[in-house]
Amino acid sequence: MALLGNSSEMVNNGSSPGEEGTVIGKTGLGGNTSDGKIFVTENNNVGDLSYSGEYTKPPTEEESGTARNDAGKATTNNKITAPHYHSQLKKMPNSFYGGCDIFDGRWVRDDSKPYYPAGSCPYIDRDFDCHLNGRRDDDYLKWRWQPNGCDIPSLNATDFLERLRGKKLIFVGDSLNRNMWESMVCILRHSVKDKKRVYEISGRMEFKKKGFYAFRFEDYNCSVDFVNAPFLVQESSFKGRNGTFETLRLDEMDKSTTTFHDADIIVFNTGHWWTHEKTSRGEYYYQEGNYVHPRLKVLKAYTKALTTWARWVDKNINSNMTQVFFRGYSITHFKGGQWNSGGQCHKEVEPIFNEAFIRKYPSKMRALEPVLQMMRTPVTYLNVSRLTDYRKDGHPSIYRKEYKTVEEKIAAVHSQDCSHWCLPGVPDTWNELLYASLLQIGRGSWGS
């Protein structure tokens, strides 16, 4: 966890030791100096420099990494020269976990995992239910995240529900946050004796569909919801001389905001849809006001969208009522191609143990951090990038559905999912870290 102090200070945009898991305090962004540093002052110039969308110099193409892995400069054998998970955010003085960074650690073998048996939760999307889809090796389930220098509690589902009594927890973002939401629903549901007291009150089963999804835990008068908003900003359309075409409004939040502005806990994410392929290669796709950019780089558009999100949070979220989290970028593990070009991960059966194979800190997260720094609203940063980078073994790969013919099985090898995660699996750890962070912050029902 980290907190920017209220006194003026200089925060360098360059490399510094990683301090992940962050609470961003009420500080403002004064501007950039000539040496590329961010000058942070006590004032927050909302609507001026703070929301100009130009907080930091975008990483170069070399810094951003190759198109193959979207993070880190790789050689032909996918090995990088050294790990570079650098965060410019300072660690918050906090003795709850002995002052250690709970996002800096390693995976250790633990046969007591997972939190719920594979195949036991009916609310997992078929695309994530690797066990149901035929994956028989279960070693990927038997790993626990161990922070360096401290221990964190296992997620006590009964305790979580008791603290959530009468409240609403919402995950907002793309299908990776749906991964995390389904994990949380299954963890909490497993602790409830009468499963009929846990039921869906809104939603659809297909994870790629738009919508609002909610599960109610009747005995605790609480709900755990998911809002599908992959960009966080509004997908729209624009009428031009040659007809109507789809655009992305970088200056407007997704229309779903009415469903989550009053939540008690919100976990945001965005990232995986910000690719050239999914944004028309940046050509006549990004819109601000009545202006459609002829061409705009993905990382710059992403930063503008985060700026819009930050402005909305500062204007609409009452931090005395709502705790805000932002979950960091989840690393993909396509080998030999990308998601749309035959990338594979189905032969991976254990985590990465050699840090020499860990990639550089994702450019999307380096773009996010300055935006978080200038916000008035405290935002807890769940920096899961490094811990996911180790877990090349945890993706659905070919186990996305049940294949009925040999031809379907052969075709599946060339259409693998190395972005999302099997459930049970890695997202259970994200929720474990969310639980640990809520206890560490200690606000309201989480303070006793």
Image: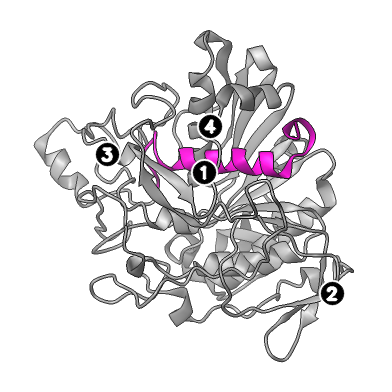
Looking at marks 2 and 4 on the same chain, the residue that comes earlier in the sequence is marked by 2
Q: What number is the disc on residue 430?
A: 1
Is tag 3's residue or tag 2's residue first in the polypeptide sequence? 2
The reply to whether callout 2 and callout 4 are in contact (CB within 8 Å) is: no
Q: Are marks 3 and 1 in contact (CB under 8 Å)?
A: no
Secondary structure, mark 2, is: loop
Depth order, front residue of 219/56: 219
Q: Is residue 438 above or below residue 198?
A: below
Is tag 4's residue or tag 3's residue first in the polypeptide sequence? 3
Disc 1 to disc 2, C-alpha distance: 33 Å
- Residues in magenta, as a range: 420-448
- Where is residue 57 drawn, in percent x and y? 63, 80
- 296 vs 139, left or right, is right
Residue 184, which numbered label? 4
Residue at left 67%, top 40%?
438
**Which kind of residue does numbered mark 2 sit on?**
Ser
Residue 391 seen in the current view? yes
Q: Quadrant of residue 336?
A: bottom left
Q: Position of residue 424 (x, y in %)?
A: 39, 33
Question: Of 224 and 239, which appears nearest the observer?
Answer: 224
Q: Disc 4 residue type?
A: Met
Q: Is residue 178 above or below residue 269?
A: above
Badge 1 element: helix
Q: CA distance from mark 4 to mark 1?
A: 9 Å
Numbered badge on residue 139: 3
What is the image's colouring?
Answer: one colour
Res 241 seen here: no
